[in-house]
Image (cartoon, helix red, strand yellow):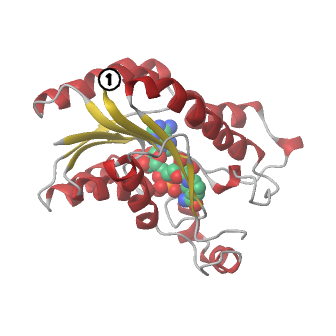
Amino acid sequence: MQTAVITGGSSGIGQSAAVELAKRGVSVIVSYHGNPDGGLETVERITKDGGTAVALPLDVGRTGTFASFKDAVADVLRDWDRTSLDYLLNNAGVGQQPVMFEDTTESLFDQMLGVHLKGPYFLTQTLLPLIANGGAIVYTSSTSALPNTHPEPGYSVYASMKGAQLVLVRYLAKELSSRGIRVNAVAPGVTRTRLGDDAFARYPELIPPIAARTALGRIGEPDDLGKVIAFLLSPDATSITAQTLEASGGYDL
Ligand SMILES: NC(=O)c1ccc[n+]([C@@H]2O[C@H](COP(=O)([O-])OP(=O)(O)OC[C@H]3O[C@@H](n4cnc5c(N)ncnc54)[C@H](OP(=O)(O)O)[C@@H]3O)[C@@H](O)[C@H]2O)c1
């Protein structure tokens, strides 16, 4: 039995990745932040099909809580007769309203930095002693950080943090290769999740223009990404490291 920690597993892409990994026999620990019901929903979706899952609280913006999160993860592993983790998905994230560069506040910058870069950086460092040699780590980045996507005005902070994740992935892949740990990123395009306070449910009119900019003619669904992430973490991707895999349906192609 393999084991995984998935941050932001209470909805959207993280929930789908948890379900996909569970289908492959992986026991998953999902974290939730403001939506404990979502964490429970993920656990129920997995356990009703015979899988194993636990939900734990985590705020990736608060590095001071990471040591106790690690202890909680170790307790769950002990309950499963395991001492190590095989997979880590750094997926938790928040959207932002478009804000032009001149109007960007230090507090928005710091929030985005904490959740998308500083948090995942130090959470990975904290959990690293638990990660087995030969394990795998994935970061959920974004097409907004890719050089082939046209920059959308108003998203300089979010995209900068997502871009920094891609650099981090390459450096971690190098350093952790000595332990056989692979490190990759997935870059979703626009995906129908609860991101941005459930923006797509509230403003469905946003969807057709984005679909029109996408080669496959539709926005992404969480399961599109869940499957790709499960693949990148799995032994099927055993020779893939330091890569960013765009899974956007051809956004801005
Ligand atoms: N949807 C898109 O179009 C899109 C495109 C590119 C990249 N992404 C990236 O995909 C990742 C997953 O987002 P999603 O689209 O699946 O959105 P989502 O449905 O809103 O899920 C976001 C997840 O992150 C968690 N989270 C938010 N703030 C957190 C914090 N401070 N500490 C810990 N967890 C926190 C949420 O937990 P709670 O709900 O429990 O608070 C939730 O589980 C994010 O990194 C996002 O930037 C999304």
Q: Residue at x 45, y 33 (%)?
A: 59
* In the foreground, 99 or 186: 186
Which quadrant does the C terminus fall into?
Answer: bottom right
* In the foreground, 24 or 111: 24
Residue at numbered disc 1: 70
Figure quadrant of residue 169: top right
Q: Is residue 150 above or below residue 208?
A: above
Expressed as whole percent of the image width and height from the top left, the position of residue 211 reads 64, 77
Q: Is residue 156 left or right of residue 120?
A: right
Q: Residue at x 46, y 18 (%)?
A: 64
Figure quadrant of residue 127: top left
Q: Secondary structure at mark 1?
A: helix
Q: Is residue 43 above or below residue 216?
A: above
* Label 1 Cα crowd, 10 Å radius (few <14 / some 14-19 / many 20+): some
Expressed as whole percent of the image width and height from the top left, the position of residue 243 reads 56, 46
Q: Is residue 59 left or right of residue 47?
A: right
* In the foreground, 110 or 84: 84
Q: Which residue ends up furthest to the front in the rendered image? A: 239
Residue 197 visible in the displayed image: no
Q: Is residue 216 left or right of residue 88?
A: right
Q: Which residue ends up furthest to the right in the rendered image? A: 102
Expressed as whole percent of the image width and height from the top left, the position of residue 157 reads 73, 42
Expressed as whole percent of the image width and height from the top left, the position of residue 153 reads 82, 56
